[in-house]
Amino acid sequence: MSYLSIEGLRLSYGKQIVIDNLDLEIRAGKITALIGPNGCGKSTLLKTIARVLTPERGTVRLRGEDIHLQNSRTVSQHLALLPQSPITPEGISIRDLVSYGRAPWCGRWGRLSGEDEQIVSDALEHVGLTELADQPASALSGGQRQRAWIAMILAQQTELVLLDEPTTWLDICHQIELLQMMRQLNQAGKTIVVVLHDLNQACRYCDELVVLKHGQLQRQGSPADIFTSELVSSVFDVTAEIHRDPIAGSPTLVALN
Amino acid sequence: MALRMGIIAGALLLLAIAGVMLGTLDLKQAMTSTWVLQELRLSRVLIAILAGAALGIAGALTQGVIRNPLASPDLIGVTAGSGLAATTTLLLFPQLAYGWLIPAAIIGGLLALLLLLWLTGDHALSPSRLVLVGIALSFWFGALVDWLLSSQPQQINAALVWLTGSLWGRGWSHVWLLLPCFLVLIPFALTLSRKLDLLALGDDTAHCLGTEVRQVRLLALSTAVALAAISVAVCGAISFIGLVAPHLARLLVGGRHLLLVPTAALLGAALLLCADIAARTLAPPIELPAGVLTSVIGAPYFMFLMLRYRGW
């Protein structure tokens, strides 16, 4: 049985069809990047996998279960989402924010058990925010804020993690930090689906690429297999040479004039 | 945090005692004093506490759902909608019992909310649109109220006192109307607090943390409308408490709704009580409507908030 499978998916915003008749399989334990030009439907697809958007037609199955037929709470115990621009509310501490990740697992009043407290502390430790835990979350810098959100997702303890352009708004140092954190999550056993803009980062940090254009699946496979100059030219309309990254050995795009 | 809430509760108690003791009548005239205390002041103090708390909670819920510190039932037109419905009932069906004002006000408030959501459409969560459309709606409802008043001049006095928001002439019968509603609605508002915490993180995140976003939003807004409408039905349109109380509460105890909602209730009660005490002691024997005082203080506070707000 496949892990995450999408069949005959159709999605539209108003009258405009964004994705039509998409079939896709995503493998367990891998980092899969969704890439494609702006407006190709990659964020829409991610939100549908997260059950934030409801498809017009078709199914998203996680371990065989159609997630759009399950309730929010059940789904939230299996998958977590870091949205493109998460809202950090005023008046709560970083620890509060991270503890919200336990919401799918605790009762109506959100009381944390001793075990929940431990999970929250571990998550804070993991992203290096233990010392700042009692500071207001809204006072954090961009990089720290993204780490706090990653800690919240860690506390949610889901097997599947969805990241929507997690590196946007970050400087290069924090981008790399975040991508390495993503790798660690994956090594800890989580399956990751991520929308990335930077193609070189996608090639370097992800196991598999899903290339979309106009809501259609163009190619799917490992970066080494599918990331070619033909693909870049047909999907992104960019003339480029593909070289090997001297450190990681992954394909690297160098654009030509 | 618990200490801060305790201090606020203590201050409220002192205010309540002051509210019972202060007044234009000299209590040393022993014959009348017990009657004045029990029949007039005590019930009036209780009504101020209950209605103020309701407005505070209604504001906290509205701000939580709309994720906007500038939102409150009176600024988005809900209070005006309740006022219009209650005025209509008061003027066109004067023979109806007073208790009918409450369902009328609730229905009016809910209709105003539906109209607002319909008019703002997909932009229901954009702070500026919501407040601007809400203000326009308030004016529109206000115009209808004026039209009603001028077409029914024989009833105008009672309606005017009630419309500006006053606790004059309220007694135990009003306490018994308010109390059961609040015994149901306030605990219910508290059960929503955790969901509102999650809603503050944005719809997508709240959804992925297991929240039924639409359902929570609908329940919280309806509760807010009901609380605001009941207080409108009893005290008339008292402005700005629904805006100021939750905002001060957020400064004092932070953004977690399990603390924020009860603190907003305490502060709302304290504010309305202050306004009412001032209203009947500032210029005796004239009674100012408490709603005038809350507006005099609330409007500059709203301007201060607007100047500081960066989320347009």
Image (cartoon, rainbow, N blue to C red):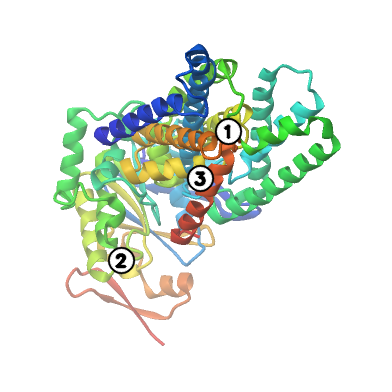
The circle on residue B225 is 1
Which of these two is toward me, A158 or A121?
A121
Q: Are marks 3 and 1 on the same chain?
A: yes
Along the line of sight, the residue nearer the viewer: A168 or B160: B160
Q: Amino acid at mark 3?
A: Ile
Does any portion of residue B212 appear in the rendered image?
no
In the displayed orientation, state which residue is furthest to the front: B29
Q: In the rendered image of this protein, does residue B30 appear above or below residue A7?
A: above
B183 displayed left or right of B286: left
- Which part of the image, by quadrant, shows the C terminus of chain A? bottom left
Viewer-closest of B241 and A221? B241
Marks 2 and 3 sit apart, C-alpha to C-alpha, by: 28 Å
> Looking at numbered disc 2 in the image, what kind of residue is underneath it?
Leu
Asked if A178 appears above or below A105 in the picture, the reply is below
**Which of the two discs, 2 and 1, sits closer to the camera?**
1
The answer as to whether the residues below labels 2 and 1 share one chain is no
Looking at the picture, which amino acid does disc 1 mark? Val
Q: Which residue is mark 2?
A: A170
Image quadrant assignment for residue B266: top left
Residue position for label 3: B66
